[in-house]
Amino acid sequence: MSSESVDSESKVSGNQANIPARIRQELDIDDGDKLRWHIEDDGTLRVQVVQQRNGTFSNFNGYDGDQETEVTTEHDTWGVDVE
């Protein structure tokens, strides 16, 4: 056993383990991110976070206005304004 302090613990259930909230926040881990696992020669487990923040809706913030719109008359099938 190592003399290093423990940051957090989680329990394995089936084949899954939860990432503690404090670690997710500190490492900015979010839904859709990937974890790459590597076992070092000395048995140390290394995990690399691969952030997936560049999809179709990655920069979409939603509609923040206060006006209601009528989708059936103001937008076409693709959600684009009708001219």
Image: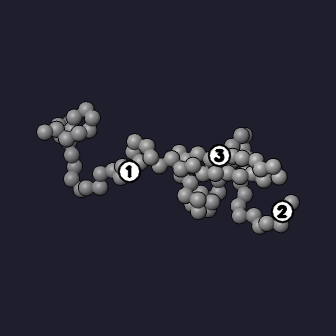
Q: Residue at x 41, y 48 (%)?
A: 58
Compared with 79, 30 (above or below) is below
Q: Amino acid at mark 1?
A: Asn
Name the amino acid type tagged 2: Ser
State yes or no: discs 1 and 2 in contact (Cβ < 8 Å).
Answer: no
Rate crowding at label 2 as few (under 14), some (14 to 19) or many (20 or more) other CA atoms within 10 Å. few
Q: Position of residue 37 (x, y in %)?
A: 69, 46
Which callout, 3 or 2, points at the residue further toward the start of the chain? 2
Q: How is the image coloured?
A: one colour
- The one of 52 and 67 positioned closer to us in this rendering: 52
Secondary-structure class at tag 3 = strand
Residue at the right extreme?
Answer: 1
Residue 21 horizontal/vertical position (percent): 61, 58
> How many other residues sit within 10 Å of disc 1, few (<14), some (14-19) or many (≥20)?
few
Query: Residue 64 at what x, y percent from top left?
Result: 29, 55
Tag 1 or tag 3, which sits nearer the N-term? 3
Vertical comparison of 3 with 72: above or below = below
Q: Is residue 65 visible?
A: yes
Instruction: Please say whether residue 31 is visible from this viewpoint.
Output: no
**In the visual, does 31 lie left or right of 13?**
left
Q: Which residue is mark 3?
A: 36
- Residue furthest out toward the left: 83
Residue at 23% across / 39% down in the picture?
80
Task: Compare residues 41 and 20 and report the one nearer the observer.
Answer: 41
Vertical placement of residue 69 versus 21, above or below: above
Q: CA distance from mark 3 to mark 2?
A: 23 Å
**Residue beneath disc 1:** 59
